[in-house]
Structure formats: C-alpha cells, structure tokens
Amino acid sequence: MNEVWNLDPIYPGFDAPEFRKDLEELKNTVAAYTAWVKTLDTLEPLEGLKTGTDYLEQLFAYGNKLVEYCMLRQAANTLDGEASSGASQVMGLLSTMAGPKAIFKDWAAKLPDLMELVASDEVLKEYTFLYSNILSSSSFQLPGMGEEIMAKMELSGSSAWGDLQQFLTSTVPVQYRGEKTNLSAIRNLAYDPDPAVRKDAYEAELNCYERISDSVAFALNSIKLETLTDCELRGYESPLDRTLKEAHMSRATLDAMLGAMDEYLPKFWQYLKAKGKALGHENGLPWYDLFAPMGAMAEKYTAEGAREYLVDLFTGFDQELADMVARAFDNAWIDFYPRSGKSGGAFCSGVDCLHESRILTNFDGQFGDVVTLAHELGHAFHNQCIDSHRVLNHDYSMPLAETASTFNECVIMNAAIKAAKTDEEKLALIESQLQDATQVICDIYSRYRFETMVFEKRKEEFLHSGALCDLMTQAQKLSYGDGLDGDVMHPYMWVCKSHYYGPTFYNFPYAFGALFARGLYAQYEREGAAFVPKYKKLLYTTAIATAEDTAKVADIDLTDRDFWRSALQMLADEIDLFCELVEKK
C-alpha cells in the first residue's frame, strides 16, 4: 500500500507542460474576463448571464486545479520552494479577479428580472441558489473598485497580521525542564500519560506567551478593527450578522443551538468534575489535565489494518461509502505517515479535476488515528456526494462542512464502544469522545463569547494583552463553570488559537457540525437503512441550499431547540456512562 499520495494525475510537476499550459490558460481567461465585464451594458441580459457564468466556470476550473496542486505539494513538504512560488503566482493572479467579479455580480443583481432569466435557461437554472445569493447580498457589496481595493489591502492588512501571529507562535522558544523546545511540541504534552509532564508543560506554555503576547495583541486588535470597518462600510449590523449571512444560516438557528448548549453545560461540568476527582483533584479539573488520557487501548493498527477495519465498518452502513473508502486506500489518495517538512494534523481536500479527494494524516497506528482517517474520509464522501453539481456549486457553508466527517466519527466510535472487550477500553473510548465533545461545546462557546466581547470593546478602545487575558478567563469561566479549577485556566488561549486571526466567528460552526451530525446519527439509529438515502440527499443539498433548507431534507427544523437537545442528550448519556466507569475504579 502507498505511504504517500499520488498527485501526478493533477500535474506531473511544476515544470510539466500541462501545468504551464493551464497557468497560461488561466492568465488568458483572467484577461478576457476582465475585458469582457467592461462590455456588460451593451449585452442582452440573458446573453450576459450565460457568458458570465461560463467565464466563472472556466476561472474556477483552471484556478482550482492549479491552487489545489500547489497547496497539496506545500502540505506534503513545507520546504518545497517550487510549491511556494507556484502558489504565490496563482493566488496573485486570482486576487485580480475580485474587481471584475464584483462588476459582474453588481450588474446581475440590478437586472429587474434576474431570477426569471435564471429559470429560463437549463444551465443557469442549476445556479438558482448562487444567483439568489448574489441578489440578496448585492446591498453589501462595495461600489466601484471597492471590492478589488479591499482584496488587495487585506494582503497587507488582516492577512499580514494573521501571518505575524502564525510566525510568532511557530517560532517562540519554550523553556521546558532546562531545555529549549517549541510551542507545538509543548502543547502536545497535554496528552502525555505522566501528570507531572502535563503540569510542567502547561506552566512552560503560559510562560512563553509573555514574550509574544503584546505583539500578538496588536495583530488581533488590527484584524478585528478591519472587520468592524468592513462591516460598517458594507452595511452589516455586526460581524456576527455578516458571518451568519455568509454561512446561509439564520440567527434563529444559532439562538436555538446556543440555548440548548446552555441547558446542557452543567452536564459537561459534571464530566469535568468526575474526571478531575478520578485524577485526584477536588476543586474541578485544572486546565493542564483537560486532555489527560484515561483507560487503555491495547490494539495498534497498520495502514492495511485500518483499511480493513474501515471498509468492513462502513459496509454495514452504506456500500457506496465503503467502496469509496477502499478506493481512497488503494488508489493513493492518502499521505499517511509523519516526516520532516510535512504539515502536522490532518485534512481532506477535494480535487475536482479528478473527481477524487486527497487526504493528509500523520498516522502512527493508534485507534485515534483510525478515527481521524474516518473523519477525513467523511469529507471525501461529502465531496463525492456534491460532485454531480456544476463546478460553481462545489462548495458548502462552514457550519455544514463538518456534517459527513463528524457523522463518520459517530459511526466508528459507537461501533468501537459496543465492541470494547474491557471496561478500560470502553473508558478510553468514551473519554476520548467526551474530550472532543467538551472542546466543541464548552471551549467553542468560550471562544464565541470571547470574540463577541472583543468586537464590542474594540469599537471604543485598543485591548492590550492584559485586557485580552481577562476577557479570555471570563469567557472560560462562563463556559466551563465549576467543571474547571478557576485558579488554573488558560488566559492566553487567544494567542495560540489561529481561528481568531482568520474568518470572523470561526467557532460556532464547529459546535453546529458536531451537534448536527449527532442529531442525524440519532435519526439513523431510529430509522435504520431507510435513513441512508435521505442522508446522501442531504449532503448533496448542502451546496445549493441554506442550512435550514438542507436540514429539511431530513425533516429537521434547526430553529427548534428540541433537535439540538436530542444531539446533546447523546453526549449526556455518555457522560453518565463515563461517571459510572470511573466510580468503579
């Protein structure tokens, strides 16, 4: 079996004639489209819409293929100079499209019979959702060259400030037990089985932030001020309003989800206190023991063993999914093992030109790595379910992005817990799942609260590092309650989490994805095989509908708090089982 993915079907290399040809085609299409939009007022509306849509499809096809190849090459080897150079060239070319695209969208939105014209053409009809969004968002578009100016200014504004945060956190030296290490390595020690290691690593981590917190505070303040200015110029009520509109999700849905989470927070505090007590703490769980492992999993997996396990598991759910999993392993979609220069973590990227995906992991044989593979293969299955859409519909909003991946996690974790041979194995599996769930409920809620407070205060004042630490601690205490030891929190979480330095409110979509998938899994447990076609239709719909309309495919009302309660109750039941198991020890 392959150890690394095969990117040759995209391009054999940067010096390949195919790469040079597509880059030239992209340049020519960019130039042609830029010239064409200047003629819009001379065109018949339907002709303009059809030609403009064709140009956008060409730009997507060439741009996406080139960008994906550069990004995947970079991820496989961060020291790949050709990949960095290629990515810079392609992204620079695509950034010039912000202005022409804005001109076309503005022209289309002003057509009095836009949606009637869209409905009259077979190709345009497939882009009904796309054009309805262009129409509804037109009032938030910057006039004239505003969009292009904003896109270019972001390169030296919020994007540069985000790069600074990434640079500082990736290079800050950390002193740990008399030796120098890095932040990534020290944060990984939070999972160490030795409690002394976890505590010392936590203290070393907090100490290192003092060196960079003032600089990172400037980055955060600047990014949030840019966001506030952008929202004001466009006419959004708030940054949250902008995020929800871009996510095609209503405030009523967000309120229903957060309301249900509020109700269930005490249940998560119960889990944290039970874990703390089992680890010898009486005043709640100290932050440094949040990720302390419990129980024991004996079995290790090879890549071949993971393939056999996952194909067999998903065959019991859906043969189409199982067949795709087999192809991913057999046809070199996956880059498995860690190596020098390779990106950390894991991700899945759709490769539209191949009608496939590529998956990066850092597999070392633990059961958690098999779960990670299942998660990323869920993204690949989601990509497969939307593949029959036209290319401009090969996307879905951030809240829906984790649906299939988290659903796959539910399938594998529930099967593993049922098959556990000992209480120690069952405890390890349940605790691992509750660790993750607590992150997407309690911690995500704290991040949402923190960002809300930062935006509110940034309107009036610059927030120095001490003020940001105070806000972070306040948000954590509200979300973790008495589940954590109030004297051992993480006031610098705003420094290390890159989510604050990218898209606005890049937090609640994680809770949405985790709970939405669990709600779907609860429905699968009730309906059995009859649910599967509905599930696949739902994934297909994510690219062409709002979050609320997507959920209706499975007869779900996202504005009904009871749906979110049903997902949270699954976790509450696991917390009860966890408490029973630790009381036996």
Image (spheres, grey):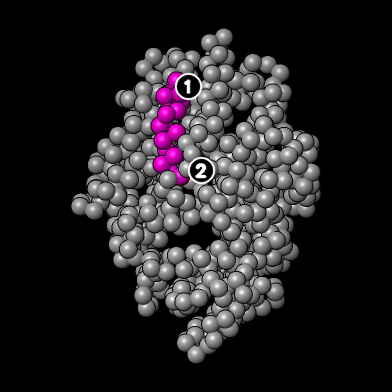
Task: Please give the residue where the numbered disc 2 appears in the rendered image.
Answer: 558
Query: Along the horizontal axis of the image, is 323 left or right of 62?
Result: right
Q: In the image shown, does 161 or 452 lie closer to the viewer?
A: 452
Q: Is residue 107 magenta?
A: no
- Mark 2 closeness class: few <14, some 14–19, many ≥20 residues within 10 Å: many
Residue 96, percent from left and from top: 47, 75
Q: Say which quarter of the image contains residue 282.
A: top left
Q: Is residue 260 magenta?
A: yes
Residue 223, percent from left and from top: 34, 56
Label the magenta part by its dominant secondary structure.
helix
Task: Please give the residue where the numbered disc 1 appears in the rendered image.
Answer: 271
Label 2 sits on a secondary structure element that is loop
Which residue lies at the image location 45% right of the left edge and 20% below the top edge?
Answer: 270
Q: Is residue 216 above or below residue 474?
A: below
Q: In the image shown, does 402 or 302 lie closer to the viewer?
A: 402
Q: Amino acid at mark 2?
A: Leu
Label 1 sits on a secondary structure element that is helix
Q: In the image shown, does 40 or 161 lie closer to the viewer?
A: 40
Q: How many marks?
A: 2
Q: Is residue 415 above or below residue 230?
A: above
Q: Is residue 117 above or below residue 372?
A: below
